[in-house]
């Protein structure tokens, strides 16, 4: 656990140093929120949440692709693949929670909400799903450009697809729509339960896939083990 926290600290410092990129990504949820601000309250909050998902996923994508050059050296120095992955994930979730807290404050101050706690829960689940999603895309694609195009396409589908369709549940952020409906439209607890179950299932799946890919990519071959112990 200590090594994972060390990795999380390193990743956080690296991301914070990229002030311009971090600031632009931090403004994405605000742009989405303002784009629907004069329409239904639920729409503006859902858009802000999806903007938060894009920002956190993009951070995960850029962080994951950048790690492909540094993690092999950390692996040789004794870090385990799961320690490296857990530390990177912790850093992204921490940054995402901080950003989500800022936007929760903006929404609560700007809107008259009946369920502010449910809005906070929606933003938290969005971050927990978006962080491993970005890392998975970064693990699969070779470069940032391909990953960014894939992420944009995925978020675009989330906007366009009717959430009532069964196929929409295949999208990783479908839980966002269910939790948003519960939080803003004051629907029954069934929306809350479906959103939480879907978010938890997607998080477990995304974390498991990325952890497996990271372990395979960073597995120590025999000649590396011999050279590191020589």
Image: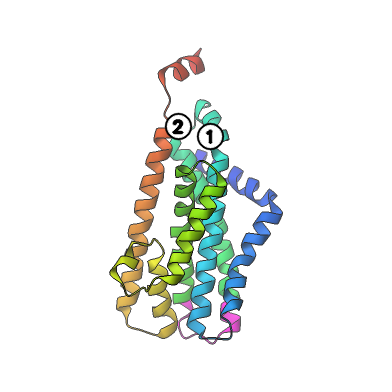
Q: Position of residue 164 (x, y in %)?
A: 32, 75
Q: Where is residue 40 in the image (x, y as percent from the top left)?
A: 50, 86
Q: In this view, does 137 lie to the left or right of 164?
A: right
What residue is disc 1 on?
71
Question: At numbered mark 1, what does the secondary structure look like: helix, strand or loop?
Answer: helix
Q: Where is residue 74 in the image (x, y as percent from the top left)?
A: 54, 31
Q: Position of residue 208 (x, y in %)?
A: 36, 47
Residue 218 marker: 2
The residue sitting at 55% across, 39% down in the picture is 67
- State the extent of the magenta-drawn residues as a range: 107-117
Residue 217 marker: none
Q: Is residue 185 visible?
A: yes
| Residue 88 vertical position relative to residue 106 in the rendered view, above or below | above
The answer to whether mark 1 and mark 2 are in CB contact below 8 A is yes
| Residue 122 vertical position relative to residue 186 in the rendered view, above or below | above
| Residue 169 vertical position relative to residue 222 in the rendered view, above or below | below
Residue 189 colored in magenta in the image: no
Q: Earlier in the sequence, mark 1 or mark 2?
A: 1
The answer to which image quadrant residue 168 occupies is: bottom left
């Amino acid at each position: 656990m200590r090594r994972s926290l060390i990795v999380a600290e390193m990743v956080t410092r690296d991301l914070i140093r990229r002030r311009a990129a971090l600031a632009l990504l931090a403004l994405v949820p605000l742009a989405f929120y303002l784009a629907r601000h004069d329409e239904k309250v639920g729409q503006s909050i859902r858009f802000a949440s999806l903007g938060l998902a894009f920002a956190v996923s993009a951070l995960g994508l850029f962080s994951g692709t950048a790690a492909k050059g540094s993690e092999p050296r950390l692996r040789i120095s004794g870090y385990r693949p799961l320690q490296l992955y857990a530390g990177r994930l912790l850093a992204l979730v921490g940054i995402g929670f901080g950003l989500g807290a800022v936007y929760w404050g903006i929404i609560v101050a700007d809107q008259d909400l009946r369920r502010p706690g449910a809005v906070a829960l929606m933003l938290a689940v969005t971050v927990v799903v978006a962080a491993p999603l970005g890392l998975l895309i970064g693990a699969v694609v070779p470069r940032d450009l391909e990953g960014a195009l894939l992420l944009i396409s995925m978020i675009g589908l989330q906007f366009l697809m009717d959430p009532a369709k069964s196929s929409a549940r295949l999208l990783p952020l479908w839980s966002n729509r269910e939790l948003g409906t519960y939080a803003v439209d004051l629907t029954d607890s069934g929306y809350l339960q479906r959103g939480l179950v879907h978010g938890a299932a997607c998080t477990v799946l995304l974390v498991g896939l990325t952890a497996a890919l990271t372990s395979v990519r960073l597995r120590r071959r025999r000649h590396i083990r011999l050279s590191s112990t020589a």
